[in-house]
Image (spheres, rainbow, N blue to C red):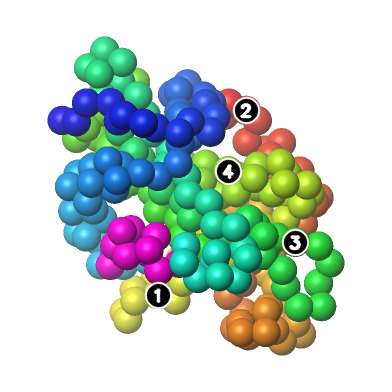
Amino acid sequence: MPNRFTNMVSLVSRCYHGVPLTFVKINKQILTFWDKHILPEIAKDPCRADNWWSWNTVLRRETILAKALGQEPETVAVVVEDAARNLAVPVGLLLIAKKYKIVRGKGTYIFVWYLSSAPRTAVDKILPHNLRPKGIGKILLETSIVFSINNRYDGRILLHAAKPVSQCTDYLPSWYSNFGLLNVPQNKKNITLARKNDSRYYYSSKSVALSISQAHDKFR
């Protein structure tokens, strides 16, 4: 097992379901650990939207694009620190664009480019029972809302639900809806000049973000 990561740029620390979590910028050590210990478990489920993702490739490609468009990309890793064993375990990865403008819309959004959570099978192999976080995907989405609030966007976020792999259940739309996000109305034809609305975009407004944040207060 790896020692604690060095040179971690800590963003904030929180406690969810009694498990202390540290939110840091993604670095090479985190990606190396992810590829070795987390990705093999993800790859066992062909229906996961992130089954084929290489985070090294994702970060190289999308951060260059986002910077070129002035969208201010930001990376976040959710890390569980096991002090007793001197371990640091990334359980979730997130890539957002902090300055994302839509056509004919008011204000700026946080756009959730990529989000990936460690499967329960991976977490159970690495962490003791008292340090196994629940709801990692929801924690990552709420983190995006926190970024939006901190950037004075009133909690507005936007994302696109990846289409399912052939013969797999289309689970993401209902998952985002159950989290509390709203589906972009079909009468809005374009998201940006380059992105057309295919009915798979979800967003949070100020009131929705407040409701989601309050609903998750009990977990902190």
Q: Nearer the viewer, residue 202 or 36?
A: 36
Determine if residue 166 is in view: yes
Tell me the magenta residue range: 50-62
Determine if residue 16 is in view: no
| Residue name at image x 60 percent, y 49 percent | 144
Residue 30: give x, y in percent of width and height: 30, 42
Q: Nearer the viewer, residue 97 or 146?
A: 97
Q: Is the residue marked by circle 4 packed among few (<14), some (14-19), or many (20+) residues within 10 Å?
A: some
Question: Which residue, given by chain and number where applicable, does mark 2 sit on?
Answer: 218
Rounded to the nearest whole Å, what is the CA distance between mark 1 and mark 2? 32 Å
Choose the circle earlier in sequence order: 3 or 1.
Answer: 3
Q: Relative to 9, does residue 203 appear above or below in the rendering? A: below
Choose the circle earlier in sequence order: 4 or 1.
Answer: 4
Outermost residue, front side: 68
Question: Which residue, given by chain and number where applicable, does mark 1 sit on?
Answer: 164
| Residue name at image x 84 percent, y 67 percent | 106
Residue type at the position of mark 3: Thr
Residue 120: give x, y in percent of width and height: 30, 42
Question: Which residue, given by chain and number where applicable, does mark 4 sit on?
Answer: 143
Q: Is the residue marked by circle 1 packed among few (<14), some (14-19), or many (20+) residues within 10 Å?
A: some
Residue 18: give x, y in percent of width and height: 47, 21
Residue type at the position of mark 4: Thr
Residue type at the position of mark 1: Pro
Kindly check if marks 4 and 3 are in contact, taking CB atoms under 8 A apart as contact. Answer: no
The secondary structure that dominates the magenta segment is helix
Q: Relative to 218, does residue 191 appear above or below in the rendering? A: below
Choose the circle earlier in sequence order: 4 or 3.
Answer: 3
Q: The N terminus lies in which quarter of the figure? A: top left
